[in-house]
Image (cartoon, rainbow, N blue to C red):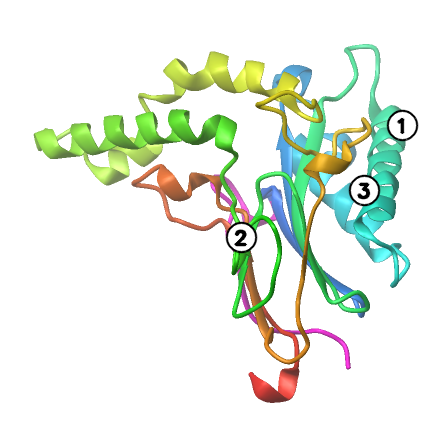
């Protein structure tokens, strides 16, 4: 019996829903949240296929997932995702420079009874085993945890002052911490798919090291529901905690 999505919520952080960078992908064999990213020259107004760059990256990932063989393992899947993105970016990049886009994902493989993670898209479930976490895979990269905590402290301090112009709505519209963290976030992209202490996995057209491909097995007798989330903003109030989530039933008749 195929996986069944019980409920889902996908929200764009800004702009129209169709421009959001997070996609829920449902196929007969896989269910996933794909979170698109863009950086570098893509901030200059490029819209490949009339999509924001991050949405374009997520769309490429969604298409690659739909073409994935049912029994593929994560190593095979990651290599296919990488080739598909590299080829798609090559087709749309022009003289202004190669588009710099990527995506992270969390997925469930029905045939393999596995939860997969590449990058900062977390997942939780009601049972299972794995070296990363007893009941889940975290969404926040260790290399960004300190920066995210500093941002949260700064924003909470502004709210605590009680100034009329520092309301949750105002801070959502104009984040004073972004200019401070921007150089760190720009530099952080260089750590993707490196094997150093701060390296992390990301589908960006380069080979993803095995150490950044995270797999957890779902025991058939216990694991019935999975809740992935593209939630790197989780620890950065006052933003909503989730930008894309879904709940899927491993054995639909027991949900």
Residue 143 sits above or below residue 63 on the image: above
Q: Taking the image as drawn, is residue 174 in sight? A: no
The residue that label 3 is drawn on is: 78
The N terminus: image quadrant: bottom right
Do the CB atoms of the residues marked 2 and 3 lie less than 8 Å apart?
no
**Which image quadrant is residue 72 in?**
bottom right
Q: Which residues are magenta?
A: 1-18
Q: Residues within 10 Å of mark 3 (few under 14, many from 20)?
A: many
The C terminus: image quadrant: bottom right
Residue 110 sits above or below residue 215 on the image: below
Precedes in sequence: disc 1 or disc 2: 1
Q: Judge by depth and name the residue closer to the eye, 147 or 218.
A: 218
User: Farthest bottom residue?
Assistant: 253
The residue that label 2 is drawn on is: 133
The residue that label 1 is drawn on is: 91
Q: Residue at x 80, y 70 (%)?
A: 28
Q: Residues within 10 Å of mark 1 (few under 14, many from 20)?
A: few
**Which image quadrant is residue 60 in?**
top right
Q: Residues within 10 Å of mark 2 (few under 14, many from 20)?
A: few
Q: CA distance from mark 1 to mark 3?
A: 20 Å
Do the CB atoms of the residues marked 1 and 2 lie less than 8 Å apart?
no
- Does 10 lie within the magenta span? yes
Q: Judge by depth and name the residue closer to the eye, 253 or 164.
A: 253
Q: Residue at x 49, y 45 (%)?
A: 231
Left-right relation of 30 to 230: right
Rendering coords of residue 132 (x, y %): 58, 48
């Amino acid at each position: 019996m195929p996986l069944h999505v019980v409920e889902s919520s996908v929200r764009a952080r800004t702009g129209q829903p169709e421009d959001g960078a997070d996609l829920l992908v449902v196929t007969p064999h896989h269910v996933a949240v794909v979170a698109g990213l863009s950086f570098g020259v893509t901030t200059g107004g490029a819209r490949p296929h009339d999509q924001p760059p991050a949405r374009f990256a997520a769309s490429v990932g969604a298409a690659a997932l739909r073409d994935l063989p049912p029994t593929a393992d994560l190593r095979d899947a990651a290599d296919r995702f990488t080739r598909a993105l590299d080829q798609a970016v090559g087709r749309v990049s022009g003289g202004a420079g190669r588009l710099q886009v990527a995506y992270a994902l969390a997925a469930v493989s029905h045939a393999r009874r596995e939860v997969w993670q590449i990058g900062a898209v977390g997942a939780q479930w009601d049972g299972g085993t794995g070296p990363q976490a007893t009941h889940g895979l975290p969404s926040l990269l260790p290399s960004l945890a300190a920066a995210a905590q500093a941002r949260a402290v700064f924003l909470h301090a502004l709210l605590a002052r009680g100034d009329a112009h520092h309301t949750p709505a105002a801070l959502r519209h104009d984040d004073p911490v972004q200019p401070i963290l921007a150089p760190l976030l720009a530099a952080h992209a260089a750590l993707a798919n490196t094997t150093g202490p701060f390296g992390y996995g990301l589908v960006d057209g380069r080979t993803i090291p095995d150490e950044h491909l995270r797999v957890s097995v779902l025991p058939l007798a216990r694991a019935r529901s999975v809740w992935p989330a593209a939630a790197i903003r989780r620890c950065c109030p006052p933003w909503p905690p989730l930008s894309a989530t879904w709940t899927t039933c491993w054995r639909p008749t027991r949900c």
